[in-house]
Image: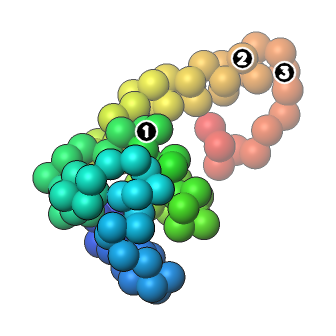
Amino acid sequence: MKKETDILRKKRRELDLSQEYIAMELGISQKAYSDIESGKTTLKNDTLCKIANILGVKPSEICPISDRCENNQDINGKHLDLVAYLKSRNIDFPEELE
């Protein structure tokens, strides 16, 4: 699996966007964005969503649930809670989501 930093760089270049442009849209410096794109800074969930919006992709396309995403455990916990709730109410859902 590609690292999210590779995906960020590739998608940004496909759209012919500069680091400066992305940084301006995020309200951060070009250096701060460069650190995100190079993997020197952990990508926070809110920043991930903003970048995904700028690039016109889903956040999961940039950072699939992985140990590099800051709120990974929160997301996994919520997923497990939802599955348990659906089961407790006998609500059918696709097996692959379990």
Quadrant housing residue 35: bottom left
- From mark 3 to mark 1, how far is it between C-alphas? 32 Å
The amino acid type, in three-letter code, at marker 3 is Asn
Seen in the image, is 57 located left or right of residue 87?
left
Provide residue 17's location: percent of width, then percent of height. Answer: 43, 78
Q: Residue at x 48, y 31 (%)?
A: 76
Q: Which mark is residue 45?
A: 1
Q: Which residue is mark 2?
A: 85
Front position among marks 3 and 1: 1
Instruction: Report, in whole angstroms, how far the alpha carbon at label 2 lies from the one at label 1.
Output: 25 Å
The disc placed on residue 13 is: none
Give whichever of discs 2 and 3 has the lower sequence position. Answer: 2
Residue 90 bears which disc, if any? 3
Element on which disc 2 rests = helix
The disc, 3 or 1, on the residue closer to the chain's N-terminal end is 1
Where residue 32 sits in the image (x, y, percent)? 22, 52
Q: Observer-nearest residue: 63 or 37? A: 37
Label 1 element class: helix
The structure residue drawn at horizontal position 41% and vertical position 67%, both measured from the top left corner, is 21
Q: Earlier in the sequence, mark 2 or mark 1?
A: 1
Q: Residue at x 58, y 57 (%)?
A: 53
Determine whether, in the image, residue 66 is placed left or right of residue 36. Answer: right
Instruction: Report whether 56 appears left or right of 42.
Output: right
Q: Can the viewer see residue 74? A: yes
Q: In the rendered image, which quarter contains the C terminus?
A: top right
Disc 1 marks a residue whose amino acid type is: Asn
Q: Residue at x 45, y 85 (%)?
A: 16
